[in-house]
Image (cartoon, rainbow, N blue to C red):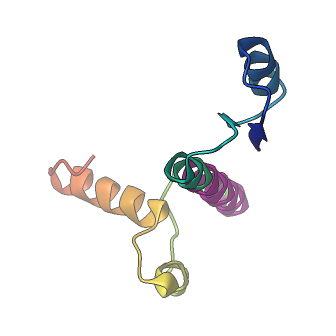
Amino acid sequence: MILLTGQGDIETAVEAMQLGAENFLTKPVDMTLLAAAIARVAEKVRLSRQNARLRAWHEAEGTGSWGLARDAGAVAADRADGGERAVDVLLSARAEREKGGSRA
């Protein structure tokens, strides 16, 4: 949550942050600051969702270690958006370590 308010005192800001606000902006708002705050919140949400997916995958695999039993179909699905996902990075790092490299 981003709090945008006309009450720009420190007490209100502290209370808002304690209640879960990611950012506290006062009116009139600088649109550059608002855009940056929105981008940070969107990135946090994206990372949180990705983390949940990775945890669910890890628990479903029951491997006890990231990267075991990863099939080619799952890798292709993860790359559908054209980007490198955290699971692929972990798999690559693991493979590099096993070969004696250091991608970590």
Q: Quadrant of the N terminus?
A: top right
Q: Is residue 47 above or below residue 74?
A: above
Q: List x then y, in percent, for residue 82.
A: 42, 83
- What residue is drawn where x is 66% and y is 42%? 28
Q: List x then y, in percent, for residue 26.
A: 68, 35
Q: Is residue 72 above or below residue 104?
A: below
Give 56 or 84, whichever is nearer the viewer: 84
Residue lying furthest top in this view? 11
Determine whether, in the image, residue 37 is placed left or right of residue 32. right
Q: List x then y, in percent, for residue 40.
A: 56, 49
Q: List x then y, in percent, for residue 10.
A: 71, 14
Answer yes or no: is residue 72 visible: no
Q: Is residue 83 above or below residue 18?
A: below
Task: Name the chief secondary structure element in magenta.
Answer: helix
What are the residue bounds of the magenta stretch? 39-61
The quadrant holding residue 91 is bottom left
Determine whether, in the image, residue 80 is placed left or right of residue 95. right
Q: Is residue 48 magenta?
A: yes
Give 100 or 49, whichever is nearer the viewer: 49
- What residue is drawn where x is 52% and y is 78%? 78
Give 81 or 70, whichever is nearer the viewer: 81
Q: Is residue 94 magenta?
A: no
- What residue is drawn where x is 15% and y is 50%? 100
The quadrant holding residue 52 is bottom right
Answer yes or no: is residue 21 visible: yes
Residue lying furthest left in this view? 101
